[in-house]
Image: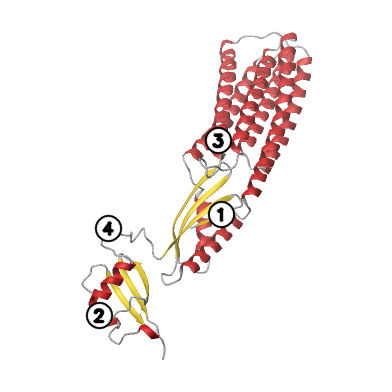
């Protein structure tokens, strides 16, 4: 049984369009800012003898490239479900986040290696001019602003990719801090501060890139929810009236959404509609606990089929075969009687309901049991007669 999200498909598509628009807008603003800062840094670093500022400008241009990746990824991942992708395209966002994280690792490693070599060889760079401090200060302020703005949008639309891009912007601010410290240190005679700070910030960049890459890999291989969240959802289900136990709960992520499969054990004698009603109550409670659950598939079990797996061999008969067996063994068995079957612990338990017009005197629980007792699948039988 499947419980779909409460809002309609049209509502969902409208949400996706709004999220795509917000993500595109903030990314384009950041891309333009990165391009302007990149030009300022490269030109300023070249004119005023700051290799660190030139490298920082290259880092800004790398942000422009990553912004193009984000724009393309968000456009694809916010498309609605189709016949080939019934759960949507959010995994494209996960792939984009992994690419962006890998890009951060590569940039951080390149910056770290270059500056580490300079630290080992003890190379002395030329004295930078004071405009380098101004350029670095403008970059720090600008990148911190775009970081906060981008992160706010990413959290609002629940996009790990946009949040990752926000952190990418902050790494550029970190690089500019390196330039600021390096330029000030060089002016005071402590030239080695430039290289040491650059290596430290490169390590931070690598750490951030690794975190986003590893989280994306875990999502792509369908890593489930945390043990704490899983136990919370199981407790919610167990506390729902009518649920005897939860013997299986599987989860996976699709972008920012959560997909769940849950098996609920209920009393075996209840109706199908009551079982479905119990399942819908569980779904509603789970959605209240975690608002980013998109789909919940719930399966209603009369017993824990992990302990007593259902037999798939053909010796467990179906309804019509059992009716025919009873008719052959009991001459006056009414074929129009209502029959309820319970498949429990790989045996079949029967309930036969007779009405006034079709209640033969020869049919009883004992005669039915005698007719079926030699079959290995037979469990028990009850015959219900109308009250006099």
Disc 1 to disc 2, C-alpha distance: 49 Å
The residue where tag 2 is placed is: 331
Residue 359 pos. (x, y %): 35, 84
Q: Tell me if residue 234 comes above or below residue 209 in the rendering.
A: below
Count residues near mark 3 (Cα–Cα under 10 Å), then give few for <14, some for 14-19, many for 20+: many
Residue at the image position 66 percent from the left and 9 percent from the top: 125
Q: Say which quarter of the image contains residue 73.
A: top right
Residue at the image position 30 percent from the left and 57 percent from the top: 312
User: What is the secondary structure assignment of the residue under circle 2?
Assistant: loop
Which corner quadrant holds the C terminus? bottom left
Residue at the image position 76 percent from the left and 19 percent from the top: 135
The residue where tag 1 is placed is: 4
Residue at the image position 45 percent from the left and 71 percent from the top: 270
Who comes first in sequence, dot 2 or dot 3? 3
Q: From the viewer's perspective, is 270 left or right of 361?
A: right
Q: From the viewer's perspective, is 130 left or right of 190?
A: right
The residue where tag 3 is placed is: 92
Residue 304 pos. (x, y %): 38, 62
User: What is the secondary structure assignment of the residue under circle 4?
Assistant: loop
Q: Nearer the viewer, residue 111 or 383?
A: 383
Who comes first in sequence, dot 2 or dot 4? 4
Disc 3 to disc 4, C-alpha distance: 42 Å
Q: Is residue 385 visible?
A: no
Disc 1 to disc 3, C-alpha distance: 22 Å
Count residues near mark 4 (Cα–Cα under 10 Å), then give few for <14, some for 14-19, many for 20+: few
Between circles 3 and 4, the one closer to the viewer is 4
The residue where tag 4 is placed is: 313
Who comes first in sequence, dot 3 or dot 4? 3
* Labelled disc at residue 115: none
User: What is the secondary structure assignment of the residue under circle 1?
Assistant: loop
Disc 2 to disc 4, C-alpha distance: 29 Å
Q: Nearer the viewer, residue 258 or 192?
A: 258
């Amino acid at each position: 049984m499947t419980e779909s999200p409460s809002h309609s498909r049209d509502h969902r598509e409208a949400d996706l369009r709004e999220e795509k628009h917000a993500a595109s807008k903030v990314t384009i603003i950041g891309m333009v800012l990165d391009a302007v800062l990149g030009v300022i840094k490269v030109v300023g670093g070249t004119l005023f003898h700051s290799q660190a500022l030139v490298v920082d400008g290259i880092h800004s241009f790398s942000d422009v490239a990553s912004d193009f990746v984000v724009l393309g990824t968000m456009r694809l991942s916010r498309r609605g479900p189709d016949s080939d992708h019934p759960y949507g395209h959010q995994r494209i966002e996960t792939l984009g986040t992994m690419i962006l994280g890998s890009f951060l690792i590569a940039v951080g490693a390149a910056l770290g290696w270059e500056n580490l070599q300079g630290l080992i060889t003890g190379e002395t760079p030329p004295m930078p001019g004071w405009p380098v401090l101004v350029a670095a200060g403008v970059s720090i302020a600008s990148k911190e602003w775009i970081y906060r703005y981008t992160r706010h949008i990413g959290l609002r639309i629940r996009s790990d990719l946009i949040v990752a891009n926000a952190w990418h912007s902050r790494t550029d601010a970190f690089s500019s801090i390196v330039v600021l410290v390096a330029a000030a240190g060089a002016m005071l005679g402590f030239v080695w501060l430039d290289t040491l700070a650059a290596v430290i910030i490169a390590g931070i960049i690598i750490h951030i890139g690794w975190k986003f890459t590893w989280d994306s890999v875990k999502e792509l291989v369908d890593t489930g929810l945390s043990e704490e969240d899983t136990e919370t959802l199981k407790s919610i289900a167990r506390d729902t009236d009518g649920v005897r136990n939860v013997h299986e709960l599987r989860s996976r992520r699709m972008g920012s959404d959560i997909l769940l499969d849950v098996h609920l054990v209920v009393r075996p004698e209840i109706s199908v509609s009551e079982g479905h009603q119990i399942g819908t109550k569980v779904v509603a409670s789970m959605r209240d606990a975690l608002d980013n659950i998109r789909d919940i598939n719930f399966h209603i079990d009369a017993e824990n089929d992990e302990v007593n797996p259902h037999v798939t061999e053909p010796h467990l008969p179906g309804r019509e075969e059992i009716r025919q067996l009873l008719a052959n063994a009991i001459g006056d068995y009414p074929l129009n009687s209502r029959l309820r079957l319970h498949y429990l612990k790989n045996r079949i338990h029967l309930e036969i309901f007779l009405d006034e017009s079709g209640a033969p005197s020869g049919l009883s629980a004992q005669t039915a049991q005698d007719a079926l007792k030699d079959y290995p699948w037979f469990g028990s039988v009850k015959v219900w007669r109308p009250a006099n």
